[in-house]
Image (cartoon, rainbow, N blue to C red):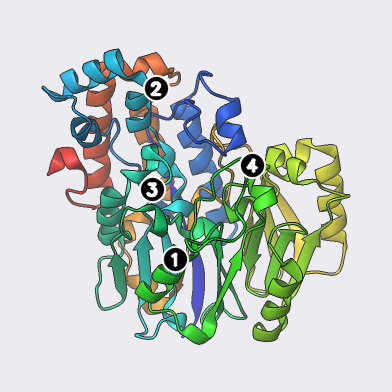
Amino acid sequence: MKAREVNFDGLVGLTHHYAGLSFGNEASTKHRYQVSNPKLAALQGLRKMKALADAGFAQAVIPPQERPGIEALRLLGFNGTDEQVVEKAWRQAPHLLSAASSASSMWVANAATVCPSADALDGKVHLTVANLNNKFHRASEAPTTERLLRAIFRDEAHFSVHPALPQVAMFGDEGAANHNRLGGDYGEPGIQLFVYGREESGGLIPARYPARQTLEASQAVARVNQVNPKQLIFAQQNPAVIDQGVFHNDVIAVSNQQVLFCHEQAFLHQQDVLGELRAKVPGFMALEVPANQVSVQDAVETYLFNSQLLSRDDGSMVLVLPQESRQHEGVWRYLNALVASDNPINELKVFDLRESMANGGGPACLRLRVVLNDAERQAVNPAVMMNDALFETLTRWVEKHYRDRLTQADLADPQLLREGREALEELTHLLHLGSVYPFQR
């Protein structure tokens, strides 16, 4: 049965702001306390979705989380009405209100890890929600993410949505941002490459920044997702590049079908990893970017590898990039040479995603890749699939509900809480999701 990859993009939330919450993500810390534009952020993401859908690439939407996260703040001892909880958190611990108001769920590459039915022992599509326990502002996402995914992939004959792994350091799981799938046709069995930063038993670790993904988590996710053990490879990310701001594998590598596009310093024991992939993936092609042409620092600043690598029906590929890659002379020179050389990538598509980029997430962060055959695609909640009507509907929804300016101090405004709930209540009806948010339950 023919299968296609569908990109489920995260819709940016109403509290998108720059708080520098993510230690190890240099773009996030660099833009701390700057003024954000939530409306522009959401519209930039929608425009990317629509442009790719118009170009023939299947697109869908994953909604944002409810923010501020009142439940998380109550667990930290702030009490009273919801408005009083916000006020007390702002007065006593503004950094906690900021964390509980983070819109980082827009980066749905961290929402879950996906196993297509062709790779699963039971023939279903599996999605295991990420626990994201390395960062407080993300660790609270898992329960709502699970409900959202169940509302989208609701047909249990085709889909199995699994809760997050235990919230302990041993099982730190960052989702698909540290997961790659390589192979031939999407509907054929592929090789799943799980990339981890550390293992509980020891070994090399970064000296400066945390390694968020553990080997133990990757192994557990593979088991939960029922990945055929013959189709698994586990590889360690290079600790030295984590210390340069490569907080996830998708900041230093991206794969699609038989192609792995990566920096030459992406993995520990990189040539061994590539050798194993060559042995298991027919027609495997590694496009390694030399450090003397693009440094790790250049890659982090431009998010060259946090790009989307997409296949056309004729087998050629498109690389979807942020405008920062085009604005960097050395990176743009390399990319044009790449397109001119003998490999499947023959087009570059550049998008303005400045609002997301300034908080540390590029095009690949904004999407969760899900391979679906025809029957599975028909079983997805149709209201989330991107088309002309949905684009117009969501654009009007954003224009109606979102602010065009937000600072950290604005998070204390009780009206922002009410605006967010009103908007999300409307969104659940537009996307036929049911009661997925805490305020609805």
The residue that appears at 82% across and 44% down in the rendered structure is: 332
Type of residue at label 1?
Glu
Q: Earlier in the sequence, mark 2 or mark 1?
A: 1
Q: Earlier in the sequence, mark 4 or mark 1?
A: 1
Residue named by callout 3: 133
Tell me the number on the disc at residue 278.
none
The residue that appears at 69% across and 56% down in the rendered structure is: 319
Q: Earlier in the sequence, mark 3 or mark 4?
A: 3
Q: Quadrant of residue 129?
A: bottom left
Relative height, residue 282 to residue 33 (above, below):
below
Query: In the image, residue 299 lies at what x, y percent?
Result: 73, 45
The reply to whether residue 311 is in sight is no
Residue named by callout 2: 403
Type of residue at label 3?
Asn
Q: Would residue 62 be found to the left or right of residue 270 on screen?
A: left
Discs 4/1, front: 1
Query: In the image, residue 127 lies at what x, y percent?
Result: 37, 66
Q: CA distance from mark 2 to mark 1?
A: 41 Å
The residue that appears at 18% across and 51% down in the rendered structure is: 434
Residue named by callout 4: 245
Query: In the image, residue 11 lies at what x, y percent?
Result: 42, 43
Residue named by callout 1: 216
Q: Quadrant of residue 78?
A: top left
